[in-house]
Image (cartoon, rainbow, N blue to C red):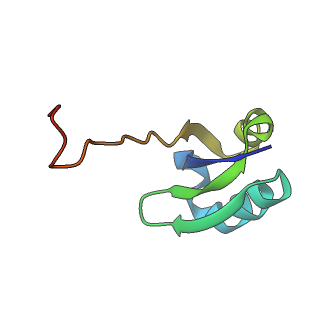
Amino acid sequence: MAKVKITVSIAENHLNQILDVTQDLRSAGMEVEHVMDGIGVVTGAADADQISAIAQVPGVSSVEREQSFQLPSPDSPIQ
């Protein structure tokens, strides 16, 4: 299954345990890319079918899929 990029917000009451939560995210199948402990956010990728398990990790407030957009090139007739 293809990986999707995700952003995980850590619950405020777990911010002091963000490294433990990050390890639990890895155990749930997330490939962690960045841990931003100052703002309580972890970014990375996971299989789409693992997102519900990642959302259930204790200390996780929310899981959002990355949105991507493709703009037409400057030479494109449609702007």
Place of residue 47 in the rendered image (x, y in percent of width and height, measured from the top left): 76, 45
Q: Nearer the viewer, residue 4 or 35?
A: 4
**Going by the image, does 77 lie left or right of 71?**
left
Image quarter of residue 69: top left
Image quarter of residue 54: top right
Quadrant (top left, top right, bottom left, bottom right) of the N terminus: top right
The residue lying at 45 percent from left, 39 percent from top is 67
Judge whether 35 appears above or below 73 on screen: below
**Going by the image, does 72 lie left or right of 69?**
left
Place of residue 2 in the rendered image (x, y in percent of width and height, measured from the top left): 73, 46
Place of residue 32 in the rendered image (x, y in percent of width and height, measured from the top left): 66, 64
**Going by the image, does 61 lie left or right of 73?**
right
Q: How many marks?
A: 0
Farthest-out residue, right = 27
Q: Nearer the viewer, residue 21 or 31?
A: 31
Judge whether 11 appears above or below 20 on screen: above
Quadrant (top left, top right, bottom left, bottom right) of the C terminus: top left
The residue lying at 67 percent from left, 46 percent from top is 59
Place of residue 49 in the rendered image (x, y in percent of width and height, measured from the top left): 80, 35
The residue lying at 78 percent from left, 60 percent from top is 26
Q: Nearer the viewer, residue 17 or 50?
A: 50
Image quarter of residue 52: top right
The residue lying at 55 percent from left, 39 percent from top is 65
